[in-house]
Amino acid sequence: MTKVMAAALAFAVLWPATARAHRLDEYLQAARVSLGRTRVLIELDLTPGATVASTIVPLIDRDADGVISPAEIEAYGRRVLADLTITLDGRDIVLQLTRIDAPSIDEMREGMGIIQLRATGRVNAGPGTRRLYLQNRHLPAASVYMVNALMPDDRAITVVSQRRDPQQSSATIAYEMGPGRIAQATWLSIGAIGLSALALFRRGATPDPRSLIPDP
């Protein structure tokens, strides 16, 4: 199962009934969290319902010319990130906006436009149990939220649990960080060197049978 399929299945299971029933008058914000050894990736899809688009569009199209420029959508993306709190083991993670795509204003007014945002944050976590906390405070009066961790690409990382608040505006993701491939390779190399040294030692310690024959 691909990462996208797994995320879609999880969203279908976790999707609140109210989100399905009231999409027209709500701002759906669906976050996906990808955990890595040195970084965290946040993918956030923002879908304004048709009846709330009239309040969302002016926040993006600041000059009201009917077109969302790259500068306008980037500025909005940074505003969204400013409303996110993310920590790892209690330490703040600084998110950097890496990409944001905007639909047309007409698509948003029809309730079909999805703003797609991607951001990354650098982390430095060693092996052990880690806890990542994410909170979304962007436009709470008009929004419904979803958050879910994706299947990690690194097999040494295992998601243990996900605890969300009733609104899913915040979540704590616990995961186990195992030793990395480099560390594993290092230990294997050390083990191989140790076995080779032991073999050489034993070979050197074994007396030559010819040395046991007395001189004539």
Image (tube, rainbow, N blue to C red):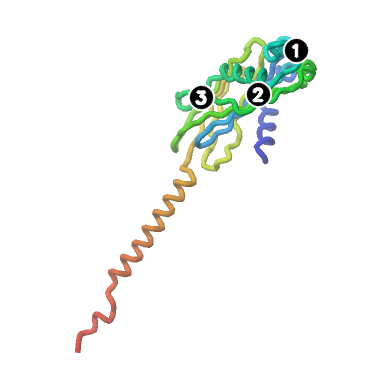
Q: Is residue 150 above or below residue 19?
A: below
> How many residues crowd around disc 1 within 10 Å: few (fewer than 14), some, or many (20 or more)?
few
Where residue 111 sits in the image (x, y, percent)?
77, 18
Number of marks in the image? 3
Extreme-bottom residue of the structure: 216
Where residue 206 sits in the image (x, y, percent)?
29, 72
Q: Is residue 169 visible?
A: no
Name the mark nearer the viewer: 3 or 1: 1
Name the mark nearer the viewer: 3 or 2: 3
Task: Measure how far apart labels 3 and 1 are at the Cα level.
Answer: 33 Å
> How many residues crowd around disc 2 within 10 Å: few (fewer than 14), some, or many (20 or more)?
many
- Mark 3 secondary-structure assignment: loop
- Mark 1 residue type: Asp
Q: Residue at x 34, y 62 (%)?
A: 198
Quick one: label 3 or label 1, which is nearer the N terminus? 1
- Mark 3 residue type: Val
Task: Measure how far apart labels 2 and 1 are at the Cα level.
Answer: 28 Å
**Quadrant assignment for the C terminus:** bottom left
Q: Which mark is residue 94?
A: 3
Mark 1, residue position: 65
- Mark 2 secondary-structure assignment: strand
Q: Is residue 58 above or below residue 215?
A: above
Q: Quadrant of residue 90?
A: top left
- Mark 1 secondary-structure assignment: loop
Q: Residue at x 47, y 46 (%)?
A: 182
Mark 2, residue position: 30
> How many residues crowd around disc 3 within 10 Å: few (fewer than 14), some, or many (20 or more)?
some
Quick one: label 3 or label 2, which is nearer the N terminus? 2
Where residue 16 sits in the image (x, y, percent)?
68, 21
Q: Quadrant of residue 59?
A: top right
Q: Is residue 173 left or right of residue 11?
A: left
- Mark 2 residue type: Ala
